[in-house]
Image (cartoon, rainbow, N blue to C red):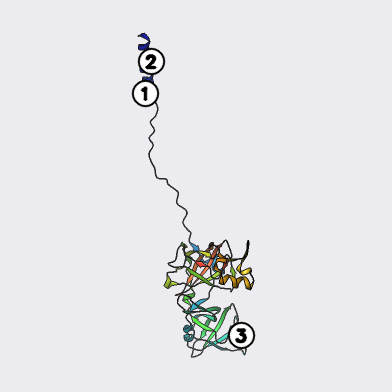
């Protein structure tokens, strides 16, 4: 009897002490919270002066544009090639004191999606009109290549002017663009090289767009049991067999190759400068699709 009473009293006192210890501790409440991640630094404004030495002053025009421009028709010297400080004559009335761009005909590009032809013109020199008449007189101020008879004149070349600052913006195009050429006709390009894209203002491309570049995977073919050869390294027989038997041919996955920034936009083409490359950039690589 006494033992049972002592046991009951022990249980009562133990519970009292346990509750007291809980009340003496600070109460911690756990509840879900939103994790806050610091914002990344914004992409800074890019000063044109920093990249100007790498940029192209070439233009893309329609082929018919060439027929409407004034031409270099001669000089006060018998030479057929002209350079800085030479005097040249232009077949038209130009405003005295006007600055000119002197361009030479470059490559023609046929856009695959529209079959439209676009004409490259290459900046050869700049000049200043010193006499205005039916045949105007121009002094060559600077020359990047020798001026030739028949070169094209562009008065006040506003289309050459680029903004003083670019505001880079990571972008994605409605449909992938394709690199169709490099400015210098190289087959493999790297950082700070200029490439030509087959999309322009009409397709939504804008100056400052940052676009990713993707390269297509290499095709390979099975030429025997356990023998795989890259097609570009294979023999003519390997390539012929691969074209007839697709079960023997494999195409590696496409991969990220780099990034470019658009700096000059025309109606149906644009120029970009490569600002990062993890692999050599090549003609045919796709741009801006993800």
Q: Which mark, residue 81?
A: 3
Graded by Cα atoms within 10 Å as few (under 14), some (14 to 19) or many (20 or more), the crowding at tag 3 reads some
Provide residue 94's location: percent of width, then percent of height.
Answer: 48, 85
Badges 1 and 3: C-beta atoms under 8 Å apart? Answer: no
Report the label total: 3
Residue annotated with mark 1: 19
Provide residue 107's location: percent of width, then percent of height.
Answer: 54, 79
Pick whichever of labels 2 and 1 is earlier in the sequence: 2
Q: Quadrant of residue 278?
A: bottom right
> Mark 1 falls on what kind of element?
helix
The residue lying at 36 percent from left, 8 percent from top is 2
Q: Is residue 186 visible?
A: no
Q: Is residue 208 above or below residue 100?
A: above
Q: Which mark, residue 30?
A: none
Provide residue 236's location: percent of width, then percent of height.
Answer: 63, 73
Front residue of this view, candidates 238 and 159? 238
> Mark 2 falls on what kind of element?
helix
Q: Which mark, residue 10?
A: 2
Pick whichever of labels 3 and 2 is earlier in the sequence: 2
Q: Quadrant of the N terminus?
A: top left
The residue lying at 38 percent from left, 10 percent from top is 3
């Amino acid at each position: 009897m006494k033992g049972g009473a002592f046991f009951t009293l022990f249980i009562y006192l133990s519970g009292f002490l346990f509750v007291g210890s809980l009340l003496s501790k600070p109460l911690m409440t756990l509840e879900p919270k939103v994790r806050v991640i610091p914002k990344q630094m914004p992409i800074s404004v890019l000063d044109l002066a920093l990249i100007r030495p790498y940029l192209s002053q070439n233009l893309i025009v329609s082929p018919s544009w060439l027929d409407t421009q004034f031409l270099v028709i001669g000089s006060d010297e018998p030479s057929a090639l002209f350079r800085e400080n030479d005097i040249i004559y232009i077949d038209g009335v130009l405003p005295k004191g006007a600055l000119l761009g002197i361009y030479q005909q470059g490559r023609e590009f046929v856009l695959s999606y529209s079959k439209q032809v676009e004409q490259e013109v290459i900046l050869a020199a700049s000049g200043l009109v010193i006499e205005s008449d039916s045949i105007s007189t121009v002094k060559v101020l600077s020359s990047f290549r020798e001026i030739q008879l028949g070169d094209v004149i562009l008065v006040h070349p506003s289309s050459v002017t680029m903004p003083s600052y670019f505001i880079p913006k990571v972008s994605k195009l409605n449909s992938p663009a394709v690199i169709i050429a490099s400015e210098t006709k190289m087959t493999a390009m790297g950082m700070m090289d200029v490439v030509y894209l087959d999309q322009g203002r009409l397709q939504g491309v804008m100056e400052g767009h940052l676009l990713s570049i993707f390269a297509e995977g290499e095709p390979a073919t099975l030429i025997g049991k356990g023998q795989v050869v890259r097609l570009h390294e294979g023999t003519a027989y390997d390539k012929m067999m691969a074209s007839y038997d697709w079960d023997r041919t494999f195409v590696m996955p496409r991969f990220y190759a780099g990034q470019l920034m658009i700096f000059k936009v025309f109606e149906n083409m644009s120029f970009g400068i490569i600002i990062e490359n993890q692999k050599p950039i090549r003609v045919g690589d796709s741009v801006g699709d993800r």
